[in-house]
């Protein structure tokens, strides 16, 4: 087995990306809530109505919903749960991968989440939980790089926690677990494509994981567009 000879670097600065993301999510939630109270006066605000993942509307050309759905939340508890997850795990990913790579991981895991949901879940969905699962995928990328480092920082109990989260999603009728699995896969593929700070990533590895992500995203969007009855 080939050993990693070059030590990784750590981004020891403040987790700016995590802080900014949480602020953006909170601002969007407040604006959406106000629009629900004073404009739509229904179960959803204006931003949710025009931004959450609704398969039929995505199919008819509103592709921005694959991105915007990740920034919206149904209620305060929904926002709090995802915000806590992003705050706890996001700081680690920003530490090991750096700000730029971390931002890309968030973006690609969010897109993979809604693409998988578009393919396999017919119900409308919204929320940042796909990005949280993308962070889990990025942490699995750390384990792929160095199991000892992973066990020292996160412990093997994190694998159990991820497994329980996936199992719970399948047993709950209100959770879009296909979106969670998409975010997990997208985060892992993106993290392995980018590599951690200081990690040497071969061209072959970038090609393999980059093609893997594009194929995953492309297949999910094709299945969603085709409207196959899963």
Image (tube, helix red, strand yellow):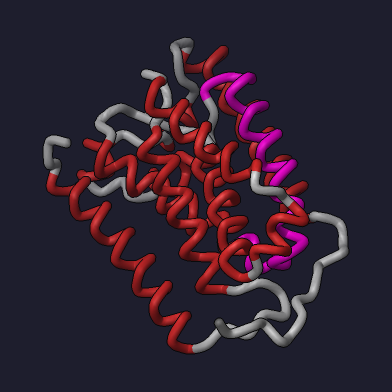
Q: Furthest-front residue in view?
A: 1
Relative depth, front residue between 51 and 143: 143
- The answer to whether residue 146 is left or right of residue 51 is right
Total numbered circles: 0
Location of residue 191 in the rendering, given as x and y in whole percent from the top left corner: 55, 65
Question: The C terminus is located in which quarter?
Answer: top left
Res 34 visible: no
Location of residue 139 in the rendering, given as x and y in whole percent from the top left corner: 62, 56
Relative depth, front residue between 199 and 68: 199
Relative depth, front residue between 142 and 106: 142
- The answer to whether residue 132 is left or right of residue 9 is left
The residue drawn where x is 62% and y is 33% is 82
Location of residue 167 in the rendering, given as x and y in whole percent from the top left corner: 44, 30
The residue drawn where x is 21% and y is 44% is 60
In the image, is residue 48 above or below residue 10? above
Please identify the dominant SS of the magenta region.
helix
Location of residue 48 in the rendering, given as x and y in whole percent from the top left corner: 46, 29
Res 117 visible: yes
In the image, is residue 123 above or below residue 183? above
Q: Furthest-right residue in view?
A: 13
Answer with the quarter of the image where residue 81 lies.
Answer: top right
Question: Was residue 93 drawn as part of the magenta stretch in this picture?
Answer: yes
- The answer to whether residue 74 is left or right of residue 171 is right
The residue drawn where x is 18% and y is 49% is 223
Relative depth, front residue between 38 and 125: 125
In the image, is residue 27 above or below residue 155? above
In the image, is residue 67 above or below residue 41? below
Range of magenta residues: 74-103
- The answer to whether residue 3 is left or right of residue 187 is right
Answer with the quarter of the image where residue 16 lies.
Answer: bottom right
């Amino acid at each position: 087995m080939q050993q990693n000879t070059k030590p990784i670097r750590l981004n020891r600065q403040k987790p700016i990306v995590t802080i900014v993301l949480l602020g953006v999510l909170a601002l969007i939630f407040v604006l959406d809530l106000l629009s629900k109270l004073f404009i739509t006066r229904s179960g959803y605000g204006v931003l949710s109505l025009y931004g959450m993942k609704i398969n039929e509307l995505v199919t008819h050309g509103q592709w921005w919903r694959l991105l915007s759905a990740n920034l919206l939340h149904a209620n305060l508890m929904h926002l709090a749960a995802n915000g806590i997850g992003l705050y706890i795990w996001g700081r680690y990913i920003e530490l090991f991968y750096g700000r730029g790579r971390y931002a890309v991981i968030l973006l690609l895991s969010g897109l993979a989440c809604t693409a998988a949901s578009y393919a396999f879940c017919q119900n409308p969905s919204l929320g940042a939980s796909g990005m949280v699962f993308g962070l889990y995928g990025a942490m699995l990328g750390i384990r792929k790089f160095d199991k000892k480092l992973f066990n020292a920082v996160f412990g093997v109990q994190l694998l159990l926690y991820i497994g329980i989260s996936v199992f719970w999603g399948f047993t709950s009728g209100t959770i879009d677990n296909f979106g969670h699995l998409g975010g997990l896969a997208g985060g892992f593929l993106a993290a392995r494509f980018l590599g951690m700070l200081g990690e040497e990533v071969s061209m072959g590895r970038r090609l393999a994981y980059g093609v893997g992500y594009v194929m995953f995203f492309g297949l999910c969007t094709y299945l969603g567009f085709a409207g196959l009855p899963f």
